[in-house]
Image (cartoon, helix red, strand yellow):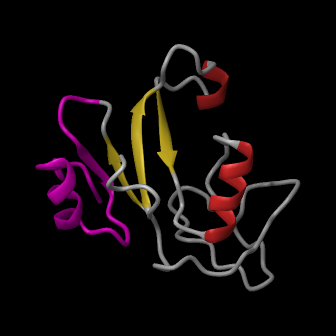
């Protein structure tokens, strides 16, 4: 994780017992993400870990702000701090099983990830 964070990677891990299952909609896993963005880094530094949903609906693609909330989930607050450095969706890797499994390839390529985590199963990835 230290070699991947901060960056455009989401790691799915098993939910530890101290995290209430309501935080993961009853799922046994949870996603970990540390964005590589100055504002996000400042917020995390001051507040610590944050439980949050994605800024886009599943399968809807990356959120492009420009004053439009488009396909965003209902939210009480939206902070648009401009584009992220690598402009695109995070790469999602499920680390909860015996071997890393690609869920979605984003701006970090599978070959870049494999240099860090070793072979990644791509069988079920779109």
Which image quadrant is residue 96 in? top left
**Extreme left residue here?**
119
| Residue in the picture at 72% in, 75% down | 81
Residue 11 appears left or right of 85: left
| Residue in the picture at 44% in, 64% down | 8
Q: Main secondary structure of the magenta part?
A: loop
Residue 15 appears left or right of 108: right
Q: Position of residue 100 (x, y in %)?
A: 22, 42
Q: Position of residue 107 (x, y in %)?
A: 37, 72
Q: Quadrant of the C terminus?
A: bottom left
Which image quadrant is residue 84 in? bottom right
Q: Position of residue 110 (x, y in %)?
A: 21, 63
| Residue in the picture at 24% in, 45% down | 101
Q: Position of residue 75 (x, y in %)?
A: 82, 54
**Extreme top residue here?**
17
**Above-or-below relation of 108 to 13:** below
Residue 51 appears left or right of 10: right
Which image quadrant is residue 26 in? top right
**Extreme right residue here?**
76
| Residue in the picture at 65% in, 29% down | 23
- Total number of numbered labels? 0
**Above-or-below relation of 64 to 92:** below
Which residues, given as a range, are shown in magenta? 97-126
- Is 114 included in the stretch rendered in magenta? yes
- Is 73 included in the stretch rendered in magenta? no
């Amino acid at each position: 994780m230290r070699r991947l964070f901060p960056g455009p990677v989401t790691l799915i891990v098993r939910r530890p017992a101290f995290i209430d299952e309501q935080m993961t909609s009853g799922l046994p896993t949870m996603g970990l993400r540390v964005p590589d963005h100055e504002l996000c880094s400042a917020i995390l530094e001051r507040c610590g870990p944050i439980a949050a949903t994605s800024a886009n609906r599943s399968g809807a693609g990356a959120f492009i702000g420009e004053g439009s909330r488009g396909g965003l989930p209902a939210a009480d607050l939206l902070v648009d701090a401009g584009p992220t450095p690598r402009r695109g969706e995070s790469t999602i890797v499920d680390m909860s099983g015996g071997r890393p499994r690609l869920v979605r390839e984003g701006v970090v390529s599978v070959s870049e990830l494999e240099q860090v985590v070793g072979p990644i199963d791509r069988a079920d990835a779109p």
